[in-house]
Every structure is written in C-alpha cells, then in structure tokens.
Amino acid sequence: DTGVSQNPRHKITKRGQNVTFRCDPISEHNRLYWYRQTLGQGPEFLTYFQNEAQLEKSRLLSDRFSAERPKGSFSTLEIQRTEQGDSAMYLCASSFAGTSGTYTDTQYFGPGTRLTVL
Amino acid sequence: AQTVTQSQPEMSVQEAETVTLSCTYDTSESDYYLFWYKQPPSRQMILVIRQEAYKQQNATENRFSVNFQKAAKSFSLKISDSQLGDAAMYFCAFPLGGETSGSRLTFGEGTQLTVNP
C-alpha cells in the first residue's frame, strides 16, 4: 500500500495562468475526494468521484475549476485563469466504499499540492 | 445544519502527560462515523482514530482514545503519554450527506497542540 500521492507538491504561478494537479489514490479505492485548505482553517470539500463518475460538487467549485477521473483511477483538478484567492493547499483523499454495512468510508489523504498565485 | 465545533484553538501538554481535545457536532443522523485527523507542519493529514456512532464502546488506538457521548454530541480525543511527535494541528471531522452523497467530511476549526519537553 503506497498511499495517496499528489503532484506537484508545490506550484507557483502568475495570475491568469492555468494549472493542473494530479492525484493518484490508493489502488483499490473507488472514491476520490478533493478538498481545499487555507492557512489556519480546516479543509473544505470541493468535489468527489465514485469510480469515474463525479457525483457531487461544492458551491466553492466555480466554473474555473474542473475535475476529472477518466478511468476511475487517478484524478486531475484544473484551475483556469487563476486568481490570488486560489492560493491554498489542495488535498486529495481516497477511500473504499463497500455495499454492505454503514455507508461512511474512511478517507486517507495525500500530502497535498500547495498553490501560490502571484 | 451539520456542523463541527472545536472550542480550543490551542492546547499545550508536557511530555509524558495526558491531554484531552474537545469536539462537539450537530447532526440529525443516527448512524455515522466520527474522525480525528492530525496535521503536522508537513501538512499531511493523518488519520488518528475513528468512532462508529452505533458502537457504545469508545475507540482506542494505542495512546489515543476517544470519549464519545452520542446524546451530548460530544467526541473528545485523549492523548496519553504525550510525545514530542504528537505536536500538530488536530481536526475533528464528520461526514456530511447520506448514502447517495458520499462521505464528504466537514472539519472543525482545529486545535493546535504543543508538546513541551
């Protein structure tokens, strides 16, 4: 079990540029979550996938944000026309949601991608 | 609304002593899990412990244990024999949504724990 990985770990970009982050979940996990965390705050939910289907998006996810998980494995989060307010840590988490028992799945987080928009 | 509240922004403990971090939550659900995560300076979010609401027995993981009071909607974390490596931000987390909404987590504000040698 290699854990959740995220790339890049750090990204510095200029306002108006597009950026893309990648998340590789734990291999047998069918759910993948994206969160955003600003300094001194807890993470805030952005979106989640079950397999390749994007099932929920937060109101925080503006039209400039798009996420994909094309084959139900890795996921990408793209931010278009970045703004200084997008500067944050972007966290990915994965979990396995079974079909029996309670629905709550335990999420394991990656190391995050720290985005700085100048 | 489902919310999570951590009323202690900062806590400190002497090495080898015991500390308790508080968390309260609000929900109308009857069956759910609760989680404590720690986030050291590296900012990797690490699962510490989880509690299943339908289980009356409090969860324990080595030096970490919880005091779960379902009626009071309270979920505190006790760290025994504190070690320098326990210093981190600790978040209480609660999953929102039902079976069709996944288990997206809502987090408390966090408690910054300092361990003094």
Image (cartoon, rainbow, N blue to C red):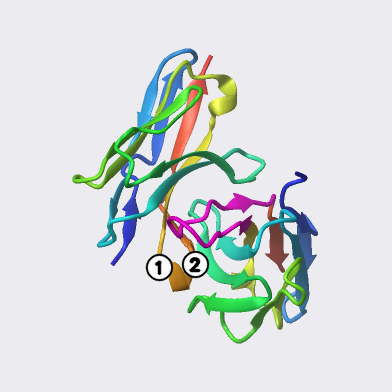
Measured Cα–Cα span from mark 2 to mark 1: 6 Å
What segment is highlighted magenta in the picture? A94-111
Q: Which residue is mark 2?
A: B102
Mark 1, Cα crowd under 10 Å, few <14 / some 14-19 / many 20+, is: some
User: In the shown orientation, is residue A4 left or right of residue B26?
Assistant: right
Q: Callout 2: 10 Å neighbours few (<14), some, many (20+)? A: many
Above or below: residue A98 compared with residue B14: below
State the mark number for residue B97: 1
Residue B48 in the image: above or below residue A93: above
Going by the numbered disc 1, the residue's amino acid type is Gly
Residue drawn at 63 percent across, 51 percent down? A109
**Could you tell me which chain the residue with mark 2 belongs to?**
B
- Residue A81 shown left or right of residue B102 in the figure: right
Q: How many marks?
A: 2
Q: Residue at x 80, y 59 (%)?
A: A8
Q: Are marks 2 and 1 in contact (CB under 8 Å)?
A: yes
Label drawn at residue A38: none
Provide residue A52's location: percent of width, then percent of height: 68, 75
